[in-house]
Image: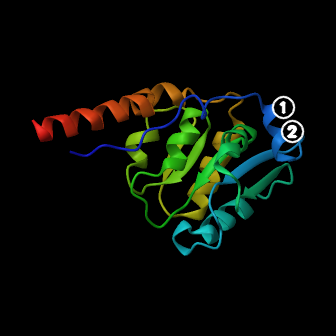
Amino acid sequence: HIVPNGVDFNKFKPYTREESIATTGWDPDKKHILFAANPNRYEKNFRLAEAAYKGLDNDEVTLNVLEDIPNELMPKYFNASDVILLTSLWEGSPNVIKEAMACNCKIVAVDVGDIKQVISSTKGCYVTGFDEKEIADRLTEALAQPNKTNGIEAIRHLDSNAVANTLTNIYKDTIL
């Protein structure tokens, strides 16, 4: 059996931008791209994210990185962001993408792991190659869209309670 990690929809959900910006302390007059990983981790490929961001050449947009942010604050960081950016060299089934989807975030992500299956059918979410110009172009498109996504609806099946029930049933079937 292959069972993906679930998402706690009581925690990861849409919050107002105002409330979320207040929590992060970010500039409310700017648009925010969130690189939701430690930029020092090689596999997260921050160099590509930074190159794509520089390709935007837009003083109204900032690139924010996360280090040592407690998990309980992550929903506010997602909701304060205008777009989530993932440029990892490899991933399996990244929780950060599923959690961002639950917050109805716009996402630009390279095609690794199961990202294409998770986000490609959601308007405002883009799957790219490892090309900084292509990533910058998709970031521009995402930033131009005024509304959040309906990402939570696309991943409703990943509710942590439903995933827990699936696991419980697998174990029950195994011991019977």
x 55%, y 26%: residue: 150
What is the three-letter code of the residue carrying label 2? Ala
Query: Residue 38 location, x and y as percent?
Result: 64, 65
| CA–CA distance in space, label 1 to label 2 | 6 Å
Q: Nearer the viewer, residue 116 or 44?
A: 44
Q: Is 101 rendered above or below residue 62?
A: above
Residue furthest left in the image: 176
Instruction: Report the side of 170 relative to 108 (left or right).
Output: left
Q: Secondary structure at mark 1?
A: helix
Residue furthest front in the image: 175
Name which quarter of the figure residue 18 lies in.
top right
Task: Please tell me how crowded label 1 is: few (under 14), some (14-19), or many (20+) other residues with Cα within 10 Å.
Answer: few
Q: Secondary structure at mark 2?
A: helix
Q: Nearer the viewer, residue 31 or 10?
A: 10
x 87%, y 47%: residue: 25
x 70%, y 37%: residue: 79
Q: Nearer the viewer, residue 106 or 159?
A: 159
Quarter in which the N terminus is drawn? top left
Name which quarter of the figure residue 92 lies in.
bottom left
Task: Please tell me how crowded label 2 is: few (under 14), some (14-19), or many (20+) other residues with Cα within 10 Å.
Answer: few
x 51%, y 63%: residue: 88
Q: On residue 18, which mark appears?
A: 1
Quarter in which the C terminus is drawn? top left
Q: Answer yes or no: do the residues labelled 1 and 2 have beta carbons within 8 Å?
A: yes
Q: On residue 22, which mark appears?
A: 2
Query: Residue 20 location, x and y as percent?
Result: 78, 36
What is the three-letter code of the residue carrying label 1? Glu
Q: Is 83 rendered above or below residue 92?
A: above
Q: Is 31 rendered above or below residue 86?
A: above
